[in-house]
Amino acid sequence: MSKKLMPFVAILLTLSLVLTACGQSSNTGKNGSKNEGSNPSSAPGDNNTFTEKSPEEYSGEFTLWAWGDFEANVVPAFNKVYPNIKVNVEVIPNSDYGRKLQTTIASRGDMPDVSLMEVSARGALMSLDAWEDLSAAPYNAKLDDLLEYALPLITNEKGEVVTIQEDATMAGIAYKRDLAREYFGTDDPKELEAIFSNWDVFVEKGKEVYEKSGGKVTLMSGLYEEGFRLLSGSYTEPWVVDGKLNIESTFKPVYELMEKMTKNNMFGKLDTWSASWNASFANNNVIFYATPTWFVPHGIKPNDPDSEGRYGLMRAPVSYQWGGTGMSIPKDAKNKELAWQFVKWVTMSMDGAKAFAEVNNTMTLYKPAMEANIYSAADPYFAGQDIMSKFIEIGKETKARPITLYDSIITDSNALTMKMIENGRTAEQAYNELVKMILESAPELK
Amino acid sequence: MVKKLGSPFMFLLMVIISLISLYPFYTMIIMGTYESNQLYTGIKFWFGDSLNKNLASVFSINFLNYYKNSLVVAISTTVLGVLVCSAAGFALGKYQFKGKKLMLAIVIGMLMIPSQLSIIAFVIEMRWFGWMDTLWPLIIPPAASAFGVFWMTQFAKNTIPTEVLESARIDGCNEMSVFLRIAMPFMRPAFVTLALLLFLWSWNSFLTPLIVLNSDALYTIPLGIRGLAGQFRNDNAAQILGITLGTIPVLFFFIAFSKNLIEGLASSAVKG
């Protein structure tokens, strides 16, 4: 009998060992959160203001939920100024970040001290009553220091600034110099800007490129999402006003333009971020790319690493912007004061701007850094062109559309209806379908 | 005559079906040996030369630790789950007691509700236990699997003859001995099947770890591998290699116990 019981005893012993291992992990986690809770800097805003201290005097730790290494990269430089603040960066997969954040908010789980808001998910997140207003006390963010265009992107419908965007996102058009010379006779940005001064020229030249190359080369990659970003970027009407859908003034003209451009083969059929789109950089099948600041280090250079000197950057006929990640402080954060030191330092300080440019190869929205010309440099990858100065020049004229709660529903539906245009349907058919799809998902917008 | 004609045909058919089934698996293995930007340039039939580069990417994240966490969670869930489910299944299948029907109805009801629906309540509960950012929520609740209890109940009801249990009691066995010495051997095929399923579910679980874990040190493989996907780029090849490496224990368990698994599935299909 005892022999037969032996396997069960063995199983129970193994189990207890294994569970002890879990227990050790859990203790670490609990201690960590206890430390955070008992931190003296964990009671922010008690007297509605943070006491000004020198950077060395701030001490303790805070947690930041990130999905990449944008923020972790600047932590060493931050710690040179704030040596006694420990930043715990916890990496959550990008595609699941919103789900985790929303579930944590709904269940009143442990929120991080700094949370990120990518622009595409920002509408739904900003509308939650879960974030500190960073323009109010005790934060009093100096919004005048940020490029003006970004304000609608960081303000919720109640007028609260619930996130501070890290990166500048103004955009132009990057082009392949060899192909520009071949098809347009020049690779000079000024000359190309003069040629491509309006959308009609885009249509005409797009047709020429397609015909001359026998259909192998297109002027631009595809409607989704580059084409849409470029063509819609100058429209600043919010997509929902007073609880009603307000997309006609943006989508109708954009779809009509798309229809015309598609009929003249100006666009290829490459979806942005698809594998074939990634491959198009090193190939010769696309000439122009809608290019915001961050797209240079994260879109072009990694996809075409061996092409130093091949690219140029020009203005688009309209000033537009695309993308951006903001940092927010949740109302339930435990270490708000320390978190704010980090957010402020990255987004609104000269040191932060320099560190950000150095490690992330792009710029923050901090105006004084742009005015001090810290980014100006010849970029060998762009054949010596000073692309940062070009972006700053564009940024002065850029305007952005305020974000609404429904933006992601509209964006998702738009991704589908643009395919209709790509496949030969008219702008009107696609627009009607878009309205239908949005109202099916959000009937309250009727 | 029919058999002679049928056999080569059946053999050929089985070869074709096996090839169709195995090709995606084979593709997964060879895709992990290419660079991400080569992956979609054409159909691949043979290994590429970027295995080392992808291995370096996989091990640039805390992969071995994710592996350890996954093993701890999956083994614990399996062992605990099999014990809990077979005990519950034996009780519900072979004993008569007040509230039995209600309990069975609750178990079946739980089978109908997708776990995604109850995730917020689950998180609140785990917070209440103080289990957030620990491995406990991945082990204890799944060990009381509604499917497992239902499965073992059906199996116990249909395969353990009541007469045998009664003779054991007459011979002086107490209830624990009846369960361990008499019922367990009868339930063995279902036991193995359930163990494999619990292991597989636990190994592949994504949503619960995503929501309850915050520390990288506690991440399991499915969550950790997603760390190779950035905001702008997915290192697809390294992710696929990570998945391939993550599949090894599941494969090992399946090969080791495939006979019992099929036996368990078949016997419950006939008698269930």
Image (cartoon, coloured by chain):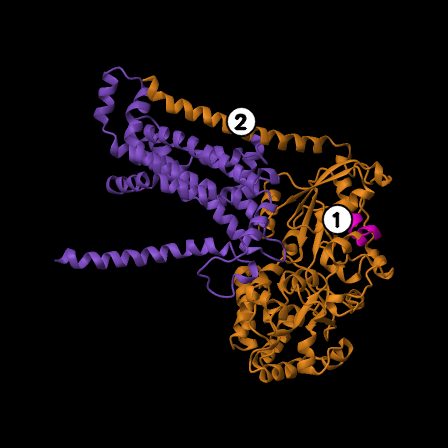
Chain colours: A orange, B purple
User: Is residue A76 in the magenta section?
Assistant: no
Q: Is residue B12 above or below residue A28?
A: below
Give the residue at x 49% y 45%: B246
Q: Main secondary structure of the magenta part?
A: helix
Q: Left of A88 or right of it: where is A355?
A: right
Image coordinates of residue A193 in percent, x first then y, are 75, 78
Which picture quadrant has residue B233? Answer: bottom right
Whether residue A168 can be seen here: yes
Q: Which residues are magenta?
A: A344-354
Q: Is residue A58 above or below residue A423?
A: above
Q: Left of B13 or right of it: where is B109?
A: right
**Distance CA(mark 1)–CA(mark 2):** 37 Å
User: Is residue A348 in the magenta section?
Assistant: yes
| Residue placed most toward the observer, B195 or B107 | B195
Image coordinates of residue B129 in percent, x first then y, are 56, 30
Give the residue at x 62% y 43%: A105
Image coordinates of residue A212 in percent, x first then y, are 60, 84
Reading the image, the residue beneath label 2 is A20
**Please, what is the three-letter code of the amino acid marked with disc 2?**
Thr
Q: Which numbered marker is on residue A74?
A: 1
Dot 1 falls on a residue whose secondary structure is helix
Please identify the quadrant where the C terminus of chain B is shown: top left
